[in-house]
């Protein structure tokens, strides 16, 4: 699979431990299926093309590509028609923080005997929030 990818012109495989922030800073556009690299791209004021369902695609700074036939046009639009909006980004981040709850991370690292108790704790926290 990777050998086939390497044969495609203009395709470079990047080491999985490469600094994603440096890659994004040097990019013209960021593409992702559903990863956080897309949101990081928006934060770095880069046009971002997403292929899956992400909550940040509600911002005009993110461009949704629903099928491969539209990819070239979507990337072209993202690069040449992109405008970054600090106001829109601020509204998105505010909504995320206002609609988030704080959880004790230790609830997610448990042994089998703790599962029911931890699930009850998580459900109680969510119920309190709702």
Image (cartoon, rainbow, N blue to C red):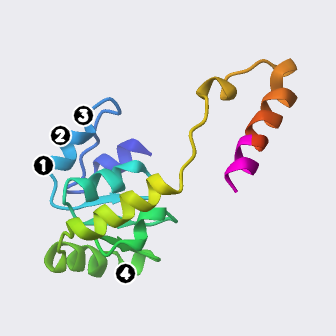
Name the residue carrying label 4: 70
CA separation in Å, label 2 and label 4: 28 Å
Residue 44, percent from left and from top? 20, 53
Q: Are marks 2 and 1 in contact (CB under 8 Å)?
A: yes
Residue at image location 78% in from the left, 18% down from the top: 111
Which label belongs to residue 19? 3
Numbered range of the magenta stretch: 125-130
Q: Are marks 2 and 4 in contact (CB under 8 Å)?
A: no
Q: SS for tag 4? A: helix
Mark earlier in primary sequence (2, 4):
2
Work out whether mark 1 precedes mark 4 in sequence or the reverse, and give the earlier one.
1
Disc 2 + disc 3, Cβ < 8 Å? yes
At x 44% / y 62%, what residue is drawn?
95
Instruction: State the residue position of label 1.
Output: 26
Q: Earlier in the sequence, mark 3 or mark 1?
A: 3
Q: Are marks 3 and 1 in contact (CB under 8 Å)?
A: no
Q: Label 2 to label 3, Cα distance in Å? A: 5 Å
């Amino acid at each position: 699979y990777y050998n086939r990818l390497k044969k495609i012109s203009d395709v470079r495989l990047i080491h999985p431990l490469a600094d994603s922030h440096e890659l994004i800073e040097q990019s013209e556009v960021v593409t992702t299926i559903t990863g956080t690299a897309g949101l990081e791209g928006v934060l770095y004021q880069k046009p971002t093309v997403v292929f899956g369902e992400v909550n940040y695609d509600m911002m005009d700074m993110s461009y949704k590509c629903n099928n491969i036939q539209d990819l070239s046009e979507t990337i072209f639009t993202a690069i040449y028609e992109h405008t970054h909006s600090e106001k829109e980004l601020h509204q998105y981040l505010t909504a995320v923080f206002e609609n988030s709850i704080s959880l004790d991370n230790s609830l997610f690292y448990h042994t089998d005997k703790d599962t029911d108790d931890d699930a009850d704790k998580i459900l109680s926290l969510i119920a309190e929030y709702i």
